[in-house]
Structures are given as structure tokens and as C-alpha cells.
Image: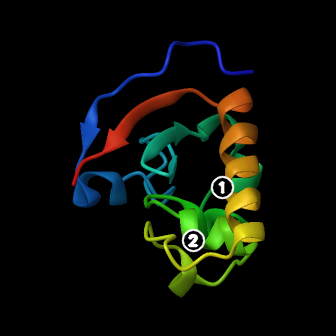
């Protein structure tokens, strides 16, 4: 369960990229619709070499909406998603919001 109030600390895309699970001394972050979630507690899924590591260190909104694990789909621009894919993206955001703390926002 997310236990902390959402934070709005800005992270640049370059800063966010450092939190991709490749450095075990750093937390692991996934961004969705600009909100950055700390997914470190779920290392079995998000650590380097694990199934969902493709989403880490970036805003993976488009891929989540498309239910895609392709690295090229892990981008923040989700303007091309269909109505159904937008619903899927919103469901992922709600799911992450319940499970993980929002630690910041992706800065433009």
C-alpha cells in the first residue's frame, strides 16, 4: 500500500534514468503519466533482468496503455493511444497509486 502523501519533486528525464534498477544502491522508479512511483519494494519484478525492468527509469505510459513490454514503446507520449488503451493506462496509474508511493514528477 502507498503510505506517503504524493510528492511533486521534479526529476529530469536524465535524472529519472539513473533509477532503472541497474545500481543496487539506488531505488527503482517507474513513471506513469508524469507521476514517478518508487517500485523498489517489488524487486522481483523491476530489478535488472526481471520482466518489468523495461518500464524502469523512464515514463512508460505508452507501453503500459498498450500492454507492451517492447522497449521502443516505453515512452511518455501516449497521444496515439486508442480509447481502450487510454482506459488501460488509467487502470495502471490507479493500480500503481494504490501500491506505490509517488516520489516526484517528470520535469519537462
Point out the image quarter for the N terminus: top right
Q: Which mark is residue 46?
A: 1
Q: Position of residue 94 (x, y in %)?
A: 71, 38
Q: Which residue is mark 2?
A: 62
Q: Which quadrant of the view contains residue 98?
A: top right
Q: Position of residue 66 (x, y in %)?
A: 71, 75
Q: Position of residue 97 (x, y in %)?
A: 65, 32
Pick out the residue farthest to the front.
83
Q: Is residue 49 visible?
A: no
Give the secondary structure at mark 2: helix
In this picture, is 44 found above or below 1?
A: below
Pick out the residue farthest to the top.
4
Task: Give the side of residue 54 with respect to residue 45, left or right.
Answer: left
Task: Give the side of residue 70 with respect to residue 24, left or right.
Answer: right
Q: Residue at x 69, y 78 (%)?
A: 69
Q: Residue at x 44, y 66 (%)?
A: 76
Q: Position of residue 107 (x, y in %)?
A: 24, 48
Mark 2 crowd level (few <14, some 14–19, many ≥20, 10 Å Cα): many
Amino acid at each position: 500500500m502507498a503510505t506517503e502523501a504524493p510528492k511533486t519533486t521534479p526529476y529530469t528525464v536524465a535524472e529519472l534514468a539513473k533509477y532503472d534498477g541497474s545500481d543496487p544502491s539506488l531505488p527503482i522508479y517507474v513513471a506513469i503519466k508524469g507521476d514517478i512511483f518508487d517500485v523498489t519494494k517489488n524487486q522481483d519484478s523491476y530489478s535488472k533482468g526481471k520482466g518489468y525492468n523495461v518500464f524502469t527509469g523512464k515514463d512508460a505510459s505508452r507501453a503500459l496503455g498498450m500492454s507492451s513490454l517492447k522497449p521502443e514503446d516505453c515512452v511518455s507520449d501516449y497521444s496515439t493511444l486508442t480509447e481502450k488503451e487510454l482506459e488501460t493506462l488509467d487502470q495502471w496509474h490507479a493500480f500503481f497509486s494504490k501500491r506505490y508511493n509517488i516520489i516526484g514528477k517528470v520535469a519537462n
